[in-house]
Image: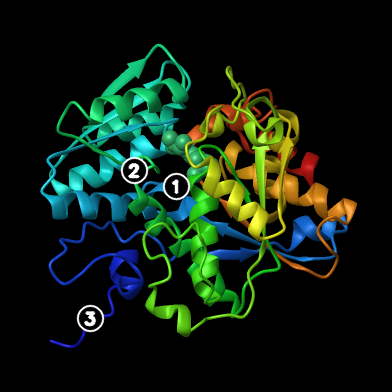
Amino acid sequence: MAKSNLYKGLVERYRDRLPVDGNTPVISLCEGDTPLIELHNLPKSLGLDVQMYVKFDGMNPTSSFKDRGMAMAVTKAAEKGAKAIVCASTGNTSAAAAAYAARAGMTAFVLIPEGKIPMGKLAQAIAHGAVVLQIRGNFDDGMRLVKEVASEAPVEIVNSVNPYRLQGQKTAALEIVEALGQAPDYHCIPVGNAGNISAYWIGFSEAAGCNTASCTLCNGKCPYLDNPMTESRPVMVGYQAAGAAPFLRNEPVEHPETLATAIRIGNPQSWDLAKAAVEESDGWFDEVTDEELLHTQSLLATLDGVFCEPASAVSVCGAIRDIKSGKIKAGSVVTCTLTGHGLKDTATAIAGREHVETINADLTSVKGAILKHV
Ligand code: F0G
């Protein structure tokens, strides 16, 4: 048989950069290899003098970036012989955990905040057969409980406190460097529990052949440190929703609130790693309001045809503001992570919008409706 070119997911793709060996049973749904889309119309219509790209990680198997980390976390859980995994989640982690647990023949227990995750994400957890535990509390309460229960019950935590999650998620940064042929000047990213910004910094650092204190697994022993893919690292910019912005307050937020439910988090677990990423890269944190982020979600969808979820739009939303103010310099290459697909949360995307015209089923009505718009 001819040699197959089948893409087998990011663990195989980056095997030499990940903590796996020949005996590791790789659990994959062909995650990763997501598009880096150059925005054409949005920067032009807003007069932004930069090259702007979105890393659309909503194009993963369960439609969010969590699949990258979950592939590694569940692979390592399988290697250990684990039978069950557990996570707290605002929705996307639970969807990914449910799917990868199904693939691995494990049970997934997911703790979600009551009434605060969109139907698309809940449907995924249920469809993949997870045990869904809705708690009368928020994500931060769930996170605390997951850490407590993991020391008393035979379950592996697959939240991003599990260092294998960050190893899987760093591959998005490697893909960006490969696609551009260099590191971007700035990388903009939504921040909730703060695992992803930490993972990108590990990835960008490895790509540039620098060691970083944040690289919790390899720490100076990475084989590719002598073999860089690019010369520089980007400035890392982390954006939060204004009602859930502990990094801006420099302390946990007790009652986080935002329509971007994915990042409705007040006590981020990867606090130190995220801080280090921003400090080491001369970057910054900032916040955007719900109104601003929803507006950006709509701009992306209507101007460039990219439909992301509200929390994802935070990266582009903040970038637009910082490009306009000159904080992000003119002429730069700017990449923004779009963490999840818009179909995850359709209710928020169309709330309050006149989106459907009802007309009679005859030619006159259809023609009249078309002529009204062209
Ligand atoms: N964007 C989306 C769509 C998310 O689902 C999350 C986190 C983030 C951004 C923030 O990433 O936590 O690494 O800083 N969602 C988690 C979940 C908390 O449970 O699905 P982070």
Foreground: disc 1 or disc 3:
1
Residue 305 in sight in this render: no
Mark 1–mark 2 CB contact (< 8 Å): yes
Disc 1 under 8 Å from ligand 1? The reply is yes
Given the image, on which type of amino acid does mark 2 rest?
Ala
Given the image, on which type of amino acid does mark 1 rest?
Ser
Label 2, secondary structure: give it: helix
Q: Which quadrant of the figure has residue 126?
A: top left
Image quarter where the N terminus lies is bottom left
**Nearest the camera: 223 or 186?**
223
Q: Which quadrant of the figure has residue 222?
A: bottom left
Disc 3 under 8 Å from ligand 1? The reply is no
Tell me: residue 298, above or below residue 218.
above
Mark 1–mark 3 CB contact (< 8 Å): no
Mark 3 neighbour density, 10 Å: few (under 14) some (14–19) many (20 or more): few
Q: Give the numbered dot on residue 64.
A: 1
